[in-house]
Amino acid sequence: MLFRAALTAIGAATSVAAVTSLEVQGSQFVNPKTGDAFQVVGVAYQIGGSAGYDPVHNKDPLSNGDICRRDAALMQMLGINTIRVYNLDPNLNHDECASIFNAAGMYMLIDVNSPLVGESLNSFEPWTSYYEAYVNRTFAIVENFKGYPNLLGFFSGNEVIDAVKTGATAPPYIRAVTRDLKNYIKNHADREIPVGYSAADVRDVLEDSWNYFQCSIEGEKDDMSRADIFALNSYSWCGDSNFHDSSYDQLVSLFKTTSVPVFYSEFGCNTPSPRIFTEIGAIYGSNMSSVFSGGVVYEFSQEDNDYGLVQVNDDGSVDLLSDFRTLQNQYAKLDFEAVQGVKATGKSITPPTCSESLIKEDGFNNNFTLPVPPPGVQKLIDNGIGKKVNGKIIDVGDWKVTQTVNDVDGTKLTNLVVKPLADGEINNPTSTESGSSSGSGNSETSDNASPRLAPLSSISAALLAVPAIVATSFAIGFTLV
């Protein structure tokens, strides 16, 4: 399916340039202005973990412009072009953060759910959680983010299916939520916005999940329940592995016939420690880039699970962890201008027809009769929700980072700023020099710094590649849609 994702108007009053809204063409994200296929170079962004979303105190990962400015500047140094944000409050204004990431050349992948009661599907008894108030909340997320040109897509589910047991109950309901979201977007957004699923890389159910969500139900002219994108949270490449031992070759073989874009919505195994991120060369190399559309590293900030690239301190200061520089160095080994400069194939791929034969695992749901929208939901789809906050790009004006940022060796980064990119540009790992964004290349020894590692005088601080701390994914432990 071709998504004609025209650039959302920004308005004459703002001087902020915008990234180009991407289209889905067959199995690729495509920049409609250049005709190039887009590779996600992403990072998971959920400061505070699940507690970072706190509707009681009007807080979520995209509600504070000062924090977003700080983190966008660091992500520009790293080379990130996409953030994935898991839990957001649809009642908050996200204009400043969305505008900062837009100006920094970064797209947003947004989950429509949260771990709170009533804000996600129950994996085992999804019919108990699929009701008007829940669906209304997912529509409110759409309303909040649909106006941002750097919105790449929505996830209607995250690791809802983690075994055959949940694969027996959840698939029709996940597909129903996808249908409802796509119908709402069709009626109330200015452009078509992809909606898809983020799967756990559980091999017993991965192929069936992919086939269940990418197939087209026979007899429907325009199957709105079909996922537009499919992503997986995969941690199969650990340490100094390779394309074969990591089973990445098996994933490429599995998805080579995909009719929708496939990419990693999380990756970055942390055992053994330190992480060395050698999978970067594979993900963006010729063996994978013709099938996969890049991936999202887990995760930006250090949480209880010890997966962070940076340590965010209580006073707002940040210490770069060794994983940050190690990942930066791995990105620097590749020619990302060439990676992002591949012309799209332009192919419109016919999806498989939904049938029992697509489902291989005994016990996984093979029924494609979907639940109808709950009472009241069709009225919302037709007329729109009542309470809503509609986001828009604004003129930010100030790009200077005010918080203290210390490098891995304890030196202080000075003059750290977000570098606004030209209209249509995206951030690129090859656009930074010596690991610094424009205006942020200076460092000084901080008298108060408590170095995490002894300085390596023979290596520039911008090229440090030293041990990282290990962790597990925050998404694990929650049943989210």
Image (tube, helix red, strand yellow):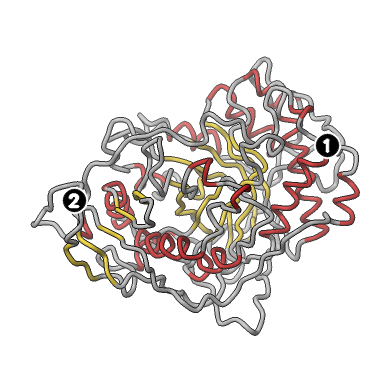
Q: Position of residue 457 (x, y in %)?
A: 9, 57
Please, what is the three-letter code of the amino acid marked with disc 2? Pro
Q: Nearer the viewer, mark 2 or mark 1?
A: 2
| Horizontal relation, residue 430 to residue 202: left or right | left
| Horizontal relation, residue 107 to residue 464: left or right | right
141 is higher (above) or lower (below) than 231 = below
Q: Position of residue 336 (x, y in %)?
A: 39, 60
Q: CA distance from mark 2 to mark 1?
A: 61 Å
Q: Position of residue 424 (x, y in %)?
A: 54, 73
Can you name the residue that lies furthest to the bottom here?
Answer: 12
The residue tagged with tag 2: helix, strand or loop?
A: loop
311 is higher (above) or lower (below) than 78 = above
Q: How many marks?
A: 2
Can you name the residue that lies furthest to the left here?
Answer: 458
Q: Label 1 belongs to which residue?
A: 218
Disc on the earlier residue, 2 or 1: 1
Residue 23 seen in render:
yes
Tell me the quadrant of the picture where the C terminus can be found: top right
The residue tagged with tag 1: helix, strand or loop?
A: loop
Task: Please name the residue shown 73% across and 23% down the image.
Answer: 125
Q: Position of residue 442 (x, y in %)?
A: 23, 71
Please, what is the three-letter code of the amino acid marked with disc 1? Glu
Q: Label 2 belongs to which residue?
A: 451
Q: Residues within 10 Å of mark 2 (few under 14, many from 20)?
A: some
Task: Please name the residue shown 53% across and 26% down the image.
Answer: 202
**Label 2–label 1 contact, CB within 8 A:** no
Residue 291 seen in render:
no
320 is higher (above) or lower (below) than 363 = below
Residue toward you, 345 or 391: 391
Task: Please name the residue shown 34% across and 33% down the image.
Answer: 238
Q: Residues within 10 Å of mark 1 (few under 14, many from 20)?
A: few
Task: Please name the residue shown 72% across and 47% down the image.
Answer: 138
